[in-house]
Image (cartoon, grey):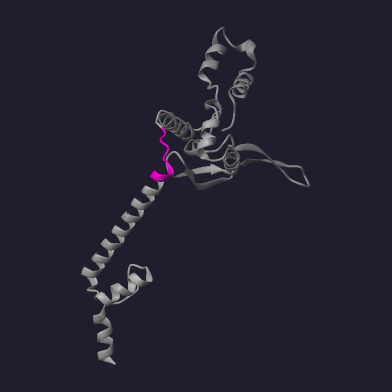
Amino acid sequence: MAFRSKEMMKKIVKNIGGEKNLASGVKQRLEKCIPKAKVVMGRAQRGLFAGRHIQFGNRVSEKGGNTSKRTWKPNVQEKRLFSYILDRQIRVKVTTHALRCIDKAGGIDEYLLKTPYHEMDTELGLFWKAKIEKLYEELGKMEVVFFTPEEETKLEEQFKEVKLEERAARREARRKMYGWSPKSELKADSEGTDGEGSLPTDFHEGMVANA
């Protein structure tokens, strides 16, 4: 329900019959009970709706001008948005308006950081905003280290060595599992592969014998 506190207060006073029918101090107590923020529907609490909620109005017929109550629901989509600070995708329900706001801000992290708390009218949005703000605050306290070109070259060589060790371990595991011959391993080395797609020599010998 997308009624604000002022509109809700006006509706309550109108139903009573005006402020003259209110006792002293009742209006102040009512204002304390009515929330200042926008009251949103329960579905919006589990996503990022960016202020888009269910709206109410009338459907008017073309000929007779007859009116009937109707509602307009927001266009909600379930998306996966990538967060750089979390280094993973966040699965969340968002409106198309919220998607445009996120694209304009530059990402889900920037949107949550730039949007003030009083405009974030959903519980999920407040949760992610507080969490990402804390992570960026911790990131700001970390020390940044820059590598020299020589150190970067050394790290690249170490990375290549690790890759070669992993390839050799996979090759050894396949040798134990399938019983490869040295001939197939030499062929895989010459082709620059791990031997994937080649079959054991026993399989070829069996095919020849069957022929």
Specify the quadrant that holds the C terminus: bottom left
Q: Quadrant of the N terminus?
A: top right
Magenta span includes 149: yes
Tell me: 103 left or right of 84. Answer: right
Residue span colored magenta:
144-151
So how many labels did they put on this image?
0
Residue found at the very far bottom of the displayed protein = 211
Q: Position of residue 18 (x, y in %)?
A: 65, 15
Residue at the extreme front of the image, as rendered: 150
> Residue 9: in sight, yes or no?
yes
Q: Residue furthest toward the right?
A: 63
**Residue 196 can be seen, yes or no:** no
Instruction: State the residue in front, 135 or 176.
Output: 176
What residue is drawn where x is 31% and y is 62%?
Answer: 167
Q: As displayed, is residue 87 above or below residue 131?
A: below
Q: Residue at x 61, y 12 (%)?
A: 21
In the rendered image, the vertical position of residue 121 relative to residue 172, given as above or below: above
Q: Position of residue 138 (x, y in %)?
A: 40, 30
Give percent across and percent down for residue 68: 67, 41
Give above or below for 1 relative to 13.
below
Nearest the eye: 101 or 138 = 138
Determine the main secondary structure of the stretch shown in magenta: loop
Q: Position of residue 56 (x, y in %)?
A: 63, 37
Frontmost residue, 200 versus 7: 200
Residue name at image x 43 percent, y 44 percent: 149
Residue 87, compared with residue 186, is above or below; it is above
The quarter of the displayed image where residue 150 is located: top left
Magenta-span inclusion, residue 81? no
Q: Quadrant of residue 139?
A: top left
